[in-house]
Amino acid sequence: MKLNANIQKVTERIIRRSEVTRERYLDRINAAKSKGVARSHLSCSGQAHAYAASGQDKSILTDGKAGNLAIVTAYNDMLSAHQPFETYPQMIKAAVREIGGTAQVAGGVPAMCDGVTQGEFGMELSLFSRDVIALAASVALSHNTFDAVVFLGVCDKIVPGLVIAAQTFGHLPAVFIPAGPMQSGLANDEKAKVRQQFAEGKIGRGELLAAEMAAYHSPGTCTFYGTANTNQMLMEFMGLHLPGASFVTPNTPLRTALTAESACQALRLSATGHCYTPVGSVLDERTFVNAMVGLNATGGSTNLLIHLVAMARAGGILIDWEDFEDVSEVTPLMARVYPNGLADVNHFHAAGGLGLMIRDLLRAGLLHPDTITIAGEGLEQYTKEPFLIDNKLNYRECPKESANDSVLRSVDNPFQPTGGIKQLCGSLGTCIMKVSAVSSEHRLVEAPARVFHDQTEVKNAFNAGEFTDDVVIVVRFQGPRANGMPELHSLTPVLSILQGRGQKVALVTDGRMSGASGKVPAAIHVCPEACDGGPLAKVMDGDILRVDAINGVIDNLTGDFISRPAMITDLTANQYGVGRELFSTFRNSVNAATAGATIFEFDR
C-alpha cells in the first residue's frame, strides 16, 4: 500500500528540520562504531577490574571474541510492574551462555510510580526522574565493556529515560524487555466509580482501599491504558521489543521464552554477531512518525507528547506538537481501552492486540513499512504473534479480524476517524488535549475561570461547594520550572462529578494530567508556563475562557488581558522536602514542555 500523503509530508518535514542535528548525531555514533569491540581497548588492569567477579564467564570475557551483553535494570520489588525483573538477570545470563556469549548487570536505574505519588510531594520529582534514569543508565554503560545492551523497564518515565540513554550510546544494539501487565482484577470502570463515591463522601477510606487493592493486585503493569502501557505499545511500533512481547503477562512460560530470546537477539545484533544493528539506526525519523501513529491509533498517554520529543532529540531528530496534530488528523482511533473505554490491555491483547493493529495500519498506508527493527528490516515482522511449541518460541500470523470490536476495530470501521490527540493554540499559549475519551458534546467549553495555584485548593473549593455553575478551572504554576510539572490526576474525581451534574467544566494547566486523562476536557502542558510569565499567569477569576478541542483553540475572551502584569507566586514550598532540594538544578535548567521538558541540550 502506498504511504499516506500526510504521513509522508510529516516525515519529510521532520527530516528537513533535523538535517543538521541528525547529521551531527550520526557522525558521533559512526565514530564510536569505528573503534570496534569496546573492551578490547581497556588496559589489562581495567579488564581485570571488569571481569574479577565474573566466575565461569571470566575466560570468555578475557578471550574477547564472544559478545558481552549489558543489562540495565529498573528492578525494585515495591512496584508491581518492575518486581518481575528480579529474576531476569540470571535468566538472561543463562540464555546468552547457550549461544556462547556473556552478560553482566551494568547498573540499575530508579523507578518511581506516579500511582503512588499522585497528590503527594514526591510527584514533583516524577518528570525529572526520566532524566535521572538517562543519566544513571549512561553511567552504567560508560565502563565501555559491552557489545550490546538490554534495558529492563516498563513504566512512565523509565522507558523514555532508557531510550534517551540508548540513543546516547547509539552505536550499541539495544533491545527492550518488558515484564508484561498484571492479570485483570477489579474492572477499571468499577474502580473509578468507587473513587468518585469516595470523593462525594458516600463511602469511607476502608471501602476505597479494598477497591484499589482489588484493581492493583499482583506483579505486572497496571492494566489500564496509561503511560506505562503506552510505552509498551511504542516499543513495538518503534521496533525495540520482539514482536508481540508487550502484553504477555508475567511469570508465564511464554514471557520467559520471550525474555531469553530478547537477550540472544541483542547479541546477534552486535558487532560480534551476524547482523550488526546499532540502535541509532533503528531509531530514525520514520520510526518516530510510526510512534506518533501508534499513539493516536490507540488513544495513548498525553505524557508521550513530552517524552517522544525528548527521546527523538537525543538522536538529533526534531519533532514537535504540530507533527502529532497532523498525524492525528489522518490516523483513526482503533482502540477503546480504559480510560477511553471499559476494557483493559489484557482484553485488547486478546482481541488481536498490536499485531492486528499494525497490520491494518500498514495495509492502509499509515505506517512506514521499511523501518529497521530489532527483529529485522520491515515492520511487517510485527504483524505476527508469539506462541510456544514444546516450550520453544515460534511465531504465527495474527488474527485477520478483531475478536471484540468494542475494544479493537479496523481502520475501515474506527471508533472515530481521527486520532486521540489535539493541539490547542491561542491567546493562552499552546497546549494539548487527549480527546479520545472526551465525548463530542464536552469538547467545547466557554465559561468563567476559577484560578488556583495548587490542586489541593481545587479540592477544598469543591468540598466547600463553590463550583455551582459552568467553570474552567485553571491550575497554574505547575510547569517544569515551577515545581517539576506534576500530574494532577487526583483532580479527576472532582472534575468528573461536576461534569456528571450537568455543568460545563474544563481544566487548563501548565502541569500534566497523565495517561489516565479521561472524560473531562483537560488542556494541559500549557506553554509558556506561568512561572516564565506566560499568559496563564495573567488570567483572573471571572475571565471568560474558551477551551475548544473541535477547532483547536484556547483563548481568554476578556478584553486586553495580556497588558496585565503577570502574577508571581511564592514557590518556596516546592523547593524542599522529599528530596526536592536536590533538584533545584533541574528546575532552573529545564526547557519547555514543547521541547521535551528536559535538562539536556541535545541540539548543540
Image (spheres, rainbow, N blue to C red):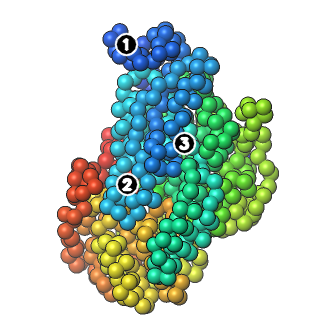
User: Which badge, 1 or 3, is on the more N-terminal residue?
Assistant: 1
Q: Which residue lies at the image location 35% right of the left edge and 9% below the top edge?
A: 44
How dense is the environment of label 2, judged by Cα within 10 Å: few (below 14), some, or many (20 and up)?
many
User: Which badge, 2 or 3, is on the more N-terminal residue?
Assistant: 3
Relative to 315, 527 lies left or right: left
The residue pinned by badge 1 equals 48
What SS does tag 3 mark?
Answer: helix
The residue pinned by badge 2 equals 126
Whether 390 is drawn above or below 577: the answer is above
What SS does tag 1 mark?
Answer: helix
The Cα–Cα distance between marks 1 and 3, rounded to whole angstroms, is 32 Å
How dense is the environment of label 1, judged by Cα within 10 Å: few (below 14), some, or many (20 and up)?
some
Residue 129 in the image: x percent, y percent?
36, 49
What SS does tag 2 mark?
Answer: helix
Amino acid at pointer 1? Ala
Residue 237 in the image: x percent, y percent?
60, 46
Q: Which residue lies at the image location 49% right of the left edge and 34% below the top edge?
A: 280
The residue lying toward the viewer, choosing from 526 and 363, is 526
In the picture, which quadrant includes the C terminus? top left
User: Which badge, 1 or 2, is on the more N-terminal residue?
Assistant: 1
The Cα–Cα distance between marks 2 and 3, rounded to whole angstroms, is 22 Å
The residue pinned by badge 3 equals 84
Q: Is residue 29 visible?
A: yes
Tell me, yes or no, whether the two marked residues, 1 and 2, touch with CB atoms within 8 Å: no
Whether 198 is drawn above or below 121: the answer is below
